[in-house]
């Protein structure tokens, strides 16, 4: 299915549904129709409003929405999102807090490239900002990257991370969430061999598939069932002429979203029908719980075909990270080369995406690291999202991570939970 027409067909269907929603909302909202007192008119307008918003969000990159934080002096400090390093497939951005001296903690938050934008970590960034200078990997939508920019696979991703770490200096503390966990580990090992002085002080790995075979999930089962040829045929398409990346082979965001929705179709269907009734009764708002969640959940981005396929083949099928046989730029990356970076793994007991055992496997690969520089935490009752952005992160994991960072820096102070970050 490597065709532009299949890509454009999906976009046409999305565009049509957005138009139908807008039309229904506009038509049912004519003042003259109110004279009929027909109860179906408010329902039609509500359905149109929810439908239009739903399908329009699928192609819009969400805003970070972090305008300011409260400082220790009680004053508001404005926050600017500035680019530190610009690359074709992703930027290194800083959340610069105005009128605040550089913080002792400097954190690089490595965002996943797995269908959603880096803004999925918005609450994680907001929780860390009061206590650290925060930098984030802001990956670009592949449909907007010209073919002339070349390829981008797991090796390129790893080299990007290594470059970002070098740009920030050796005092950086890296926190990788979900998909980039094995590649953040590989990037650190790559630096350990190529430029030892550029290694970060600490590396926190949260819920990632270092060894997918350590615990089976639906994700790992899918990787075993489907051959690479089948996957390439079913998932890969060419970007249509509407976008700058026309002709680029991608795993489309809309196709990914279809998979996300299908996994919990009943729950999502119920959520949308309930929202229609809330809108019809005038009980909904622009930033209510439903819209806050789905504005982010529905905003999807295309991945380059080579990145998606190489992730499945090399990380899941061949287990190159787990077997310490990962190669970057023609050189094998030895995880045992890491000998001075403090490494911590965090897993959720109820994580059904990266099950317990997959992430902690990283510690067994670190043969050159002393035990006092290794740590692990299993959060009881926590699912995948909870360990980096939910209640478990806010109340338990965040202070543990900050304390680990301080220990790696040699400060030994205890992390405090500010009201802005801990509630």
Image (cartoon, rainbow, N blue to C red):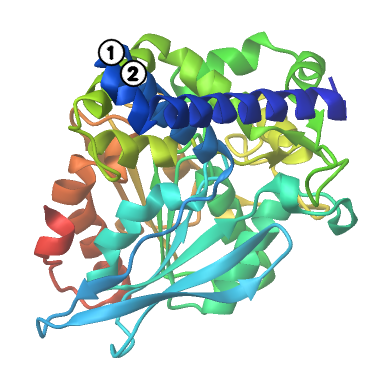
Q: Is residue 329 left or right of residue 154?
A: right
Residue under label 2: 41
Circle 1: element type: loop
Residue 364: image x %, image y %? 45, 41
Residue 150, percent from left and from top: 86, 54
Residues 197 and 19: in front is: 19
**Image position of 7 (left or right of 171):** right
**Other-residue count near label 2 (Cα within 10 Å), few / some / many at <14 / 14–19 / ≥20:** many
Using the image as rendered, state which of residue 360 and residue 256 is in the foreground.
256
**Residue at figure coordinates x 55%, y 46% from the top left:** 60
Determine which quarter of the picture holds residue 361: top left
Where is 255 relative to 378, above or below?
above
The residue tagged 1 is 38
Closer to us: 94 or 402: 94
| Circles 2 and 1: CB atoms closer than 8 Å | yes
Percent x, y of residue 57 = 50, 39
| Count of residue discs | 2
Q: Secondary structure at mark 2?
A: helix
Residue in view at x 50 percent, y 56 percent: 368
């Amino acid at each position: 299915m490597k065709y532009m027409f299949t890509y454009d067909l999906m976009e046409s269907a999305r565009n049509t549904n957005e138009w139908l929603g807008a039309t229904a909302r506009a038509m049912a909202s004519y003042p003259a129709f109110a004279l009929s007192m027909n109860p179906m008119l408010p329902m039609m307008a509500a359905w149109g409003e929810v439908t239009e918003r739903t399908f329009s969000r699928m192609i819009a990159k969400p805003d970070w929405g972090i305008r300011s934080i409260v400082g220790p002096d009680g004053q508001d400090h404005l926050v600017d999102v500035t680019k530190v390093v610009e690359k074709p497939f992703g930027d290194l951005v800083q959340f610069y807090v105005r009128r605040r001296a550089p913080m002792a903690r400097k954190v690089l938050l490595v965002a996943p490239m797995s269908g959603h934008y880096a803004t999925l970590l918005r609450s994680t960034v907001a929780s860390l900002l009061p206590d650290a200078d925060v930098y984030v990997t802001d990956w670009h939508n592949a449909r907007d990257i010209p073919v002339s920019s070349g390829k981008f696979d797991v090796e390129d991703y790893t080299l990007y991370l290594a470059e970002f770490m070098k740009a920030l200096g050796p005092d950086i503390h890296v926190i990788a969430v979900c998909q980039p966990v094995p590649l953040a580990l590989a990037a650190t090992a790559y630096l350990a061999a190529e430029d030892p002085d550029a290694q970060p002080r600490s590396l926190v790995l949260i819920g990632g598939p270092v060894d997918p075979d350590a615990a089976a999930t639906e994700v790992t089962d899918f990787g075993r069932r489907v051959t690479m040829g089948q996957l390439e045929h079913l998932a890969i398409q060419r970007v249509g002429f509407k976008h700058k990346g026309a002709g680029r082979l991608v795993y489309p965001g809309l196709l990914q979203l279809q998979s996300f929705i299908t996994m919990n179709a009943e729950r999502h269907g119920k959520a949308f029908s309930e929202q229609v009734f809330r809108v019809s009764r005038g009980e909904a708002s622009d930033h209510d719980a439903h819209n806050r969640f789905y504005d982010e959940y529905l905003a999807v981005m295309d991945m380059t075909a080579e990145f998606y396929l190489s992730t499945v083949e090399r990380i899941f099928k061949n287990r190159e990270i787990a077997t310490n046989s990962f190669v970057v730029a023609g050189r094998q990356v030895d995880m045992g080369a890491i000998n001075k970076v403090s490494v911590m793994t965090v897993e959720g007991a109820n994580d059904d995406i990266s099950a317990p055992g997959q992430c902690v496997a990283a510690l067994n690969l670190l043969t050159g690291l002393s035990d006092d520089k290794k740590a692990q935490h299993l959060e009881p009752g926590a699912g995948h999202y909870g360990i980096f952005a939910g209640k478990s992160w806010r109340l338990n994991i965040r202070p543990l991570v900050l304390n680990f960072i301080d220990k790696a820096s040699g400060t030994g102070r205890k992390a405090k939970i500010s009201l802005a970050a801990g509630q």
